[in-house]
Image (cartoon, helix red, strand yellow):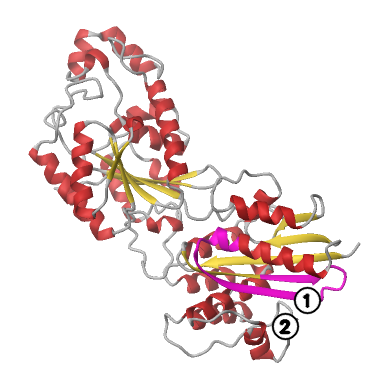
Amino acid sequence: MREFIVEADGGSRGNPGPAGYGAVVSDAATGETLREAAEYIGVATNNVAEYRGLLAGLRAAHELDPGAAVHVRMDSKLVVEQMSGRWKIKHPGMKPLAADAARIFPPGRVTYEWIPRERNKHADRLANEAMDAGARGEQWSASTSTAELDTGAGAGAGAGAEAVAPAGPPGDAAAGAARVREALATGRGEADASTDAARGTATATDAARATDVDSATDAARATEADTARATDVDSATDAARATEADTATAKADADTRAAKAVATPGWAPADMGAPATFVLLRHGETPLTPQKRFSGSGGTDPSLSDIGRDQAERAAALLARRGTIQAIVSSPLARTRETAGIIAARLGLEVSVDDGLRETDFGAWEGLTFAEVRERHPDDLNAWLASPDAEPTGGGESFAATATRIAATRDKLIAAYTGRTVLLVTHVTPIKTLVRLALGAPPESLFRMELSAASLSVVAYYADGNASLRLLNDTSHLR
């Protein structure tokens, strides 16, 4: 049985943004390049472009010999793991692409292997050539491949063929792609070249540093250092001041991390594509807020105070400057709906209401201060502080029940807003719970977080079920 090697890649300059793919079919025995394919596909995400590259490579291999065995090598951990059946495919845009790829050859005739990006140069070059062609209003063809133009080789040129950087302005797409290839050829390394192509990568730091939520001041000091993942530059509260024009950081940084973080052969962090990004906004002040009274979903449902409305206006101005909020979802309570309405009017968006984002019901403690609850219900309060399963006096909602509700709401919203940035206007306990769950922190961590009125936090949820957290609990811009 004949055996082919298929190497495929795809990229998006913006994620989503102008996208293209490249694929190479070679003979497994001789290494000879048998077929190249590349195409500009318009606006798409990195992962969709990668799947399109896989499809093109498999179809080209099938045309050469439908009875062959195929070994696919890609630098997308996501595609490799999903097509190998080890990861679920949740994104609705990728499910049909994966299904199409699985039907090209019979089951068992195609195997998958993750490789570092530096070993996938040929397909990567073709994908960049396709995107460059798209920027010129053209489609890629083998006759304009840089391997042929710059080396005199034909369409079967190997992966080592590199292009000389053409002249052009710093933002020119063709020049940028060629600078990447030149950097690789001169030994600067894949990581530096990918960063150059991205033209403005946000600094990626450990999200665990954001766990210092015991102090609002400490969390505020983290605003410039705790960019959890470079793909979080779409977040409305990203204070890294990353360049917003033509960023390709999702692809560049994911691939850079994969190349650097190989623990054992064949393993590296995945490129998860664009996450569902939740910008978490606590409502503005109510008359009960400065008095630090329990104010849940079972009380008087207060509206915003004058200070709270001013905070909401200032938050709206901040989010309008960022310009990346694509949808707004609010708790059904008056203070959150009012805050969300002020922001929606500024951003020109509609507000959806989700009951799952409501505050905990504090039962008989509603409207009381902590000292008043300790005086009137000391045993119930001690039990509540000791166990997340304990309910407030009078049949309120336990923190365990709140967490179950919030987790279900989170999963529903992730499915609805994959790849988008959505503002969730909610309350102290739901936000703390989302933060706790994102960090995998124990229930008692809820009592160690300070969350100011109208403060902002960000959680990005990726396709593998993991999350990265950014805390921006500084409200100085709202005063």
Q: Alpha carbon of mark 2 to alpha carbon of mark 1: how far?
A: 8 Å
Pinpoint residue 186: horizontal percent, then vertical percent.
Answer: 61, 81
Identity of the residue drawn at 40% across and 31% down: 406
Q: Quadrant of residue 28?
A: bottom right
Relative to 408, is 57 on the left or the right? right
Residue under label 2: 155
Residue 396 visible: yes
- The circle drawn on residue 33 is 1
Identity of the residue drawn at 17% across and 18% down: 368
Q: Is 313 rendered above or below residue 337?
A: below
Pinpoint residue 268: horizontal percent, then vertical percent.
Answer: 63, 54
Pinpoint residue 401: horizontal percent, then vertical percent.
Answer: 40, 21
Report the front residue among 261 and 335: 335
Relative to 347, is 419 on the left or the right? right
Q: Is 473 rendered above or below residue 391?
A: below
In the image, the segment drawn in magenta is 23-50
**In the image, what residue type sits under mark 2?**
Ala
Q: Residues within 10 Å of mark 1 (few under 14, many from 20)?
A: some
- The circle drawn on residue 131 is none
Q: Is residue 44 magenta?
A: yes
**In the image, what residue type sits under mark 1?**
Thr
Q: Earlier in the sequence, mark 2 or mark 1?
A: 1
